[in-house]
Image (cartoon, grey):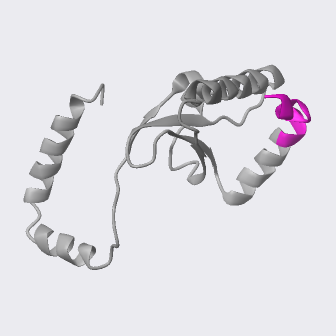
Amino acid sequence: MDGFGGMADLFANWEAATSQIANWAELEARSAECVDHAAASLIVLRPDLSYMAESTPISGERPFRKYYWWYAIPGKEQELEEVAKAYVELYESKGIDMGFRLYQTVMGPELPTYLVVENAASEADYHAQSAEVQAALGEEEMKA
């Protein structure tokens, strides 16, 4: 979506798609019996706070994901974003090849939140890459 205006199209497309499913109401009813509650959020990619987002594809070739949720203290979002920028600068200065994407939650039940997503070919690959990153960053990471 290019903005919040795209949500109307999204919902219209959703309604059109689900209306074509003969047993959609039954599926929703069965689902409701299994769910205590549900919440939806809208998150947006923040390329300015991400490192190598364009070369860190979300793809089938790298299906393992590590998610870090940052629950910001209300009013401290700008300070948190400065920390994210410091990480980007540190990764750039060290030539780290493991990127990350940072998303910001702009609508949802838990605001302000940010989501950092790292990916790898497998869990073992992720841990190996992560160890290399930690070794490369060293004590400088604590200053970020």
Residue shown at the point (73%, 32%) measured from the top left: 97
Q: How many marks?
A: 0
As displayed, is residue 127 above or below residue 45?
below
Q: Is 122 placed left or right of 111 in the picture?
A: right
Q: Is 78 placed left or right of 41 in the picture?
A: right
| Residue 138: in magenta span | yes
Q: Which residues are magenta?
A: 134-144
The spot of residue 84 in percent (x, y) is 66, 29
Q: Nearer the viewer, residue 53 or 29?
A: 29
Residue shown at the point (78%, 24%) measured from the top left: 90
| Residue 100: in magenta span | no
The spot of residue 34 in percent (x, y) is 32, 78
* Dominant SS type (magenta): helix
Q: Quadrant of the C terminus?
A: top right
Q: Quadrant of residue 22?
A: bottom left
Q: Quadrant of the N terminus?
A: top left
- In the current view of this chain or complex, which residue is farthest to the front? 75
The spot of residue 73 in percent (x, y) is 58, 39
As displayed, is residue 8 above or below residue 67?
above
Residue shown at the point (81%, 39%) measured from the top left: 133
The spot of residue 80 in percent (x, y) is 63, 30
Residue shown at the point (57%, 35%) measured from the top left: 101
Q: Is 23 placed left or right of 90 in the picture?
A: left
